[in-house]
Amino acid sequence: MRTMPLPLKPYWRSAVVLFGCVLVLYLIYASWRQFYPVSAAAGWKVQVYRDDIAMVSALALDGRGGLYVSQEISGGKGKILRLAADGSVSEALTGLSKPDGQVMFRGGLVTGQEGGALPVLWLRDGKAEALFEGNNVEGIATDGQLLYAIEDARPGRLLRFAPDSGELAVLRAGLDDGEGLGLCADGRLFYTEKRKGWVKQWQADGPDVL
């Protein structure tokens, strides 16, 4: 004789869904917790500068003794704070979605947003100007003339933007979760792909160097 499984009652279905959500959150927390607390390598020291700002993601020195700090909160609740040399804190820019990646550029601050297809913004003289749109922009760098950005997406892109002409060039496409980039004084450009676990040097001609 074949028996039919009894359907779950509504409150049991809710309990199962809730348990599944809690389990997923726990697994995410457990995987992240291995990086906390921060520790210094041999020969280096680390100290706590501020511990009262939530969801800090990116930092940029403003050249006047102040520090810009991004709060990587989604849904238009992200902010850029400015920590002055005297310890005071003010809101420099609000209404952002996961602001991440910051660099000082021509007297202002350029910041990306990792919350989807959103503009990269240039904050100067108290006003924000949209430069170009990216998808989950994670890292930003500059040589003083051009801006470089990388997308934390699958597929993601490595971008170059010329503010004077407004030209946006795609240097690399099809990246697997681009995480950060760095520009050396001699012009060499390095970028990372998080899921691949590697750092590459971009090449204008030929394949990039691992």
Image: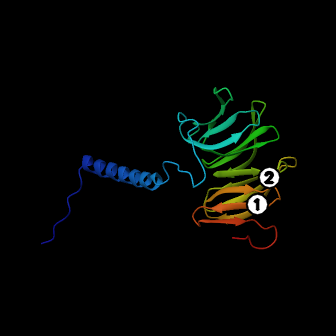
Q: Please state which of residues 76 and 90 is positioned toward the viewer in this rendering.
A: 90
Label 2 vs label 1: CA separation? 14 Å
Marking on residue 99 = none
Dot 1 amino acid type: Leu
Q: Is residue 7 above or below residue 67?
A: below
Q: Which residue is mark 2?
A: 161
Q: Please state which of residues 209 and 118 is positioned toward the viewer in this rendering.
A: 209
Q: How far across and down, in percent of the image, does residue 19 sit?
A: 32, 51
- The answer to whether residue 79 shows anywhere in this view is yes
Q: Which SS class for mark 1?
A: strand
Dot 2 amino acid type: Phe
Picture quarter with the N terminus = bottom left
Q: How far across and down, in percent of the image, does residue 43 sit?
A: 60, 53
Q: Quadrant of residue 169?
A: bottom right
**Reading the chain from its start, which is encountered first: label 2 or label 1?**
2
Binning the other alpha carbons within 10 Å of mark 1 as few (below 14), some (14 to 19) or many (20 upward) gives: some
Depth-wise, is mark 2 or mark 1 nearer the camera?
Answer: 1
Picture quarter with the C terminus = bottom right
Q: Which residue is mark 1?
A: 189
Q: How many marks?
A: 2
Binning the other alpha carbons within 10 Å of mark 2 as few (below 14), some (14 to 19) or many (20 upward) gives: some
Outermost residue to the right: 165
Q: Which SS class for mark 2?
A: strand
Residue at screen point 56% across, 39% down: 48
Name the side, left or right, on which 6 lies relative to 56: left
- The answer to whether residue 93 shows anywhere in this view is no
Residue at screen point 82% across, 71% down: 205
Q: Please state which of residues 106 and 130 is positioned toward the viewer in this rendering.
A: 106
Outermost residue to the left: 1
